[in-house]
Amino acid sequence: MGQAWAVAVGALLAVFGLGSIVFPRTVYANFVWHYFWGPVYADAHGWSYAAWADGEQVRVSSSDVASGMGPVAEPGYTIYSEVGYAVILIVMLVGVALLLRRLDIERYRRLFYALFPFVPLGGALRVLEDANNVLPAEASAFALDYPANTLFISPLIYFTMFFLTLAALLVALWVHRNGYADTYEYPLAAMGTAMLAATLAAIFALAFTTEGLSPPRLEFYPIITVLTLTFATVATGGTWALLERFAPEVNEGTGYIGLVIIWGQSVDGVSNVIGLDWYDELVPVATADLDPKHPVNKFVQDFTGQVLPESITAVTGDAWTFLLVKLVAAVFVVWVFDEEIFEESPRFTFMLLLAILAVGLGPGTRDMLRATFLV
């Protein structure tokens, strides 16, 4: 298994690494840069658009530029990048499963809960980088310049979080195996919680201790966080109650991990509904609702607006169906991961569930905090 994984990783590196060297225009500029690195580069510089321009990577005002400037990238995701990140995620999950086997780690359910704080931590760190683009350099000691800030931009932040979590796990194992703690899970959870608290404290510091600057500081609208967590919890509780009442077999495999999965996806769904439909009503200084950054979000919103009459969407908005999609997808995941899957491959199963939580709660945390602090 380990050799097969190494061969797969080597093949991916060879295709895109050597391909970028041998065919720099076709492979690197028109694919790797256009769909992967270009959006990161534009985001890291706070640009709306970046043009390839024979490798100079210049700022442009729109995606419509002269043909000689090559591909144009903008912050966010495309369908190509999302598929690519999904492939990278699967490869990384297999690698993590192999690593856990080598570290001789068991009790995966407890490991899942111990790693939970690291999921919103990733979203919070992303917001700290977002603030870095909004505030002037003298606003705080948290300011990062290019290329260091790319470590906190997707997809590199996933690698950053991987190595950060791995370091915390190794420290927790050392603490436990040297007799300083009864288990490794509690020290691991404590480190994740401490880092999450420190990151949130840094964001609050930017919001309340940078007056006198232009822009002076971040705004703070706690109603966004309160409504997001409240509605997400209500949606999760209602969904879980219906499952327990009418289809209890769905929850038999995952148990309360399934509840956490549904809640994480609900946070993502509700944060999108609030940001895309109700932001300008909830935040007085906002001139418009936020724009979807993921192709799937935009597709669901556009589809709802096309199917439902304007008389309905004028009242309900057109992003609420995204929450339904997230809930249905989460329930499907919980149903698929039955007891048989846990018994056959518990290590990989729990890593996959953690990844599913991360792709919901991570972006949901970022969207919620960005809207809360008007980043």
Image (cartoon, rainbow, N blue to C red):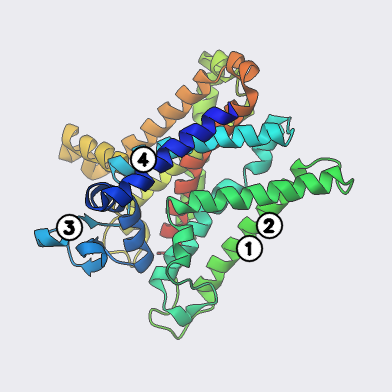
Q: Are marks 2 and 4 in contact (CB under 8 Å)?
A: no
Q: CA distance from mark 1 to mark 4?
A: 40 Å
Nearer the observer: mark 2 or 4; the answer is 4
Q: Residue furthest front?
A: 22
Residue 114: give x, y in percent of width and height.
68, 41
Q: Which residue is mark 1?
A: 198
Which three-letter amino acid code belongs to the residue tagged 3?
Gly
Nearer the observer: mark 1 or 4; the answer is 4
Q: CA distance from mark 1 to mark 2?
A: 6 Å
Which three-letter amino acid code belongs to the residue tagged 1?
Ala
Residue 31 vs 258, above or below: the answer is: below
Q: Which residue is mark 2?
A: 194
Name which residue lies at 44% across and 43% down: 268
Callout 1: SS: helix
The crowd level at tag 3 (other Cα within 10 Å; few <14, some 14-19, many 20+) is some
* Residue closer to the observer: 194 or 301: 194
Residue 156: give x, y in percent of width and height.
46, 53
- Side of 231 relative to 187 (left or right): left
Name which residue lies at 75% across and 50% down: 171
Residue 170 vs 264, above or below: the answer is: below
